[in-house]
Amino acid sequence: MLASVMVLNTMAQSGTNSPYSQYGLGTQADQATGFSRGMDGLGIAYRDGGQLNFKNPASYSAMDSLTFVFDVGMSGQLTNFEENGKRINAKNANIEYAVAGFRAFKHVGMSFGILPFTNVGYNYSSTSKVGDINATTYTNTYKGSGGLHQAYLGIGWEPFKGVSLGVNGSYLWGSYNRSIVNSYSDEYVNTLSKYYSAEVANYKLDAGLQFSFNFSKKTNLTIGLTYGLGHNLGADPECRVISRNSQTAVSDTALYVLKDGLKVPTTLGAGLMLNLKGKLRVGADYTLQKWAEVGFPQYGVVDNKPSYQIKENYFKDRHKVTIGGEYCRKQDSRKFLDKVRYRVGASYATPYLYINGADGPKELSVSAGFGIPIVNAWNNRSTLNISGQWVRLDAPGLLKENTFRINVGITFNEKWFSKWKVE
């Protein structure tokens, strides 16, 4: 597969320890705020004036006119890797996001924030013999770090009752550095090492729609649609190949640069959410990322000559389905337990990587969590969101990953725009 994992970092700050982050732009970040993570990322049709939902910018139009919402989240995770009967654990922690929002005008809400887009972070090696009899061994060491970040500004507008639309404009930036360093136990053998890097500074554009249908005063159905623009990132990825003779200390370096070699895919999403009497919300999301139309730079040999060029069919389309729900007995109650929100969710995503000519890992995850009200003398609208999530990446013959993640988010809901009344 990837090779037997012999060395792996036990702590990382990139948001991942996964060897799968060596492919493409890295592992995709879970772009969801605290309330949504309790439902395993559900959110395309979620609409609530007290929560920020950047999964669909149309939801900003539901923002409460009296409040300013600020939401920050972090996570810690423990991952178990398994391959060829070998197991190893790794852990990491990361600040996930910081977002804010407010109502700008009647029926118009705005949001802004920063969040991860992809993560790269791995360090492992493999050792094998050269031939069946020769005592010489060779070791390949694989390392990677970096990732892309996203800062966005969004607006949501409800031009007609029950119909909302919105857009997020984002600045996408970051870099990745990957290396495959080759070494031999016999110092007289030439080594060949490859170093990959890229710098990204570009835009990202996402749009959304929501349609709400009221069946009664407290029961409604919301349909959500989202669209993410696929486009070139204007980045020039590099590949540096170094051949070195350990005996003579002579090295030869070849640099390959590929102009405009990175791209993000078109993304389509649809969701449903039923709100029953303001107590129970249940819903489902479907997301399609059209990775099959995206190639990726790869070093190889073509016609007996070294080559660094875009490889087509590097990815395949990714389909993801999420179901989940939220229950709150009585949101406006004075009793603490009545105001707690209970959340649960599950999702399944098809493989989108090709690894050694076969499908990469599929993803299965489940989560559960709570929205705990923060009550004090001046505020009873803020929420502490805590959830636990289990994620499994699995494919026949490939490395298996089981990750247990704790997500913690705090939604500060302050009455900044309420008017004071003097008697």
Image (tube, rainbow, N blue to C red):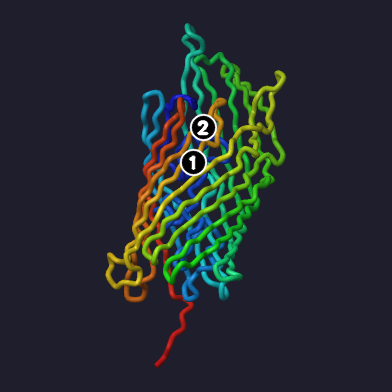
Q: Is residue 48 above or below residue 233?
A: below
Q: Position of residue 419 (x, y in %)?
A: 46, 83
Q: Is residue 255 above or below residue 110?
A: above
View extreme (top): residue: 133
Name the image quarter holding residue 375.
Answer: bottom left
Q: Position of residue 215 (x, y in %)?
A: 46, 67
Q: Amino acid at mark 2?
A: Gly
Question: For the residue labelled by badge 2, is the local secondary structure a helix, a strand or a loop?
Answer: loop
Element type at mark 1: strand
The numbered disc on residue 408 is: none
The reply, left or right, for residue 283 in relation to residue 308 is: left
Asked if 62 appears above or below 41 in the picture, the reply is below
Q: Residues within 10 Å of mark 2 (few under 14, many from 20)?
A: many
Residue for point 46% across, 45% down: 15
- Kindly identify the residue that appears in the image at 53 percent across and 16 percent down: 187
- Residue pointed to by mark 2: 360
**Picture coordinates of residue 125 (x, y %)?**
47, 27
The residue singled out by tag 1 in the image is: 349
Toward which corner of the image does residue 85 lie, by quadrant? Answer: top left
Sequence-wise, which precedes: disc 1 or disc 2?
1
Residue type (three-letter) at the residue carrying disc 1: Ala
Q: Quadrant of the C terminus?
A: bottom left
Numbered disc total: 2
Q: Quadrant of residue 315?
A: top right
